[in-house]
Image (tube, rainbow, N blue to C red):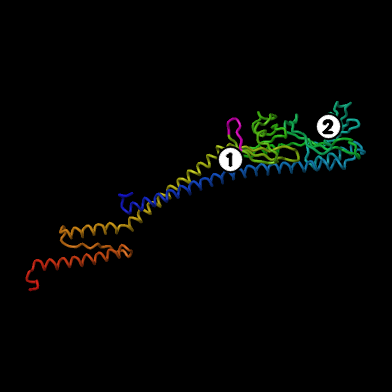
Amino acid sequence: MKNLNIKTKLLVTLSVVIIISFFILGVNSINKEFEQQYNGIKKEELSLAKESSKYIDAFFKSKMSIVESYAKKLSLDDNAQDIIKNLDIGKNAGNFVDLYVGLEKNGYLFSPLDGVLTPQKDDYDPRTRDWYKDAVKFDKVGVSSPYVDNSTKKLVVSIFAPLKQGDKTVGVISSDIFIDTIVDTILKIKLKETGYAYLVNKNSQIFVHKDKNLLNKKDKLFGKIKMGENSSFKEENIDGVDLLTSYSLIPSVQWYLVTRLEKQEITAEIRNLIFNTIFIYVVLLIVILLIIYITLKKLLSPIEKLQDGLNFFFRYLNGQEKQIKSLNIKTNDEFGTMAKVLDEEMKAIEIAIYISTLVIFNPSSKRKK
């Protein structure tokens, strides 16, 4: 820096200060950009899980409410035809596949679809079925695990509730529901390119998934991310793949909606944003440095004229030049004022030297003693 001129020193100093400032601002901006994007996808993923689980929960609660209502008002003292007629009304009201009642005392089943089934005539006893046993065991309205209907090959659940006379359970009312709408809703959920959603039960068993090979298998991911909360977001690595995951409980059925998204897709997007930010900062830095360079060159150009003018003046004093040359600096700043003073002083010196020369070379002009 010692051997550089003032213009270069100023340019280098300003450039270093600006580059350091841009670096600090750039790093801060990039960090904020990464945090904003990461928190955005976290919020989006968790919100999607919560909203979807709320939709499913509301769906099942409405169906459970109908079944529970019929469990309270259905009279088993009516004849079989009246019971079936009432069940048919409930079936249509709840848009069920079927709504049926199994009796505790004799194992009879009343159904709008099948009529009256008996253990003796039809070799069918509802008391041996899981939906019946669960209703008696839990003594409240509930939902069975999903299963595939043999005839339609669609995913079905049963919603059941005990029929009570006082404190005694006299039967169980149950309904069958196709949940293909829910399945379609879950399978249509898409996060970016690599993200999707699926359903597991409280034992981490998968029963809705886009990969049919994983159905009825235990989900390794959910087993790792499940915590005490009803919903949460977490980063996890499964089979060497970094994932951004979330889950949300569906309270009415004790299922969990799980979402997963490959982290590298988000980091790639963030990386592109960072590169764009860096590019903008670099272009802006170059533009600013060019403006500073041009401005300094224009503002400090009088210094070179002053330097050249003074060098010319010293050559004039040494007899190397024959007459003074004006600095010719017309600016209204300090350089212009300095140049005006120097021009006046050099002109005065030139006149003084000229007069001295006339005296020296013209003896007659000397005063006689």
**x and y, in percent, of residue 214 in the image:** 66, 29
The answer to whether mark 2 and mark 1 are in CB contact below 8 A is no
In which quadrant will I find the C terminus? bottom left
Image vertical order of residue 32 relative to residue 117, above or below: below
Q: Is residue 201 magenta?
A: no
SS at circle 1: loop
Q: Which residue is mark 2?
A: 133
Which comes sooner in the sequence, label 2 or label 1? 2
| Mark 2–mark 1 distance (CA, rounded to whole Å) | 44 Å
Residue 172 is labelled as none
From the image, give the main secondary structure of the stretch colored magenta. strand
Q: x and y percent of residue 48 in the render?
A: 65, 43
**As shown in the figure, which amino acid type bears the numbered disc 2?**
Lys
Looking at the picture, tell me which residue is in the foreground, 102 or 254.
Answer: 254
Q: Residue at x 36, y 50 (%)?
A: 12
Disc 1 target residue = 192
In percent of width and height, residue 243 lies at 60, 36
Query: 25 or 244: which is nearer to us?
Result: 25
Which range is magenta?
Answer: 235-241
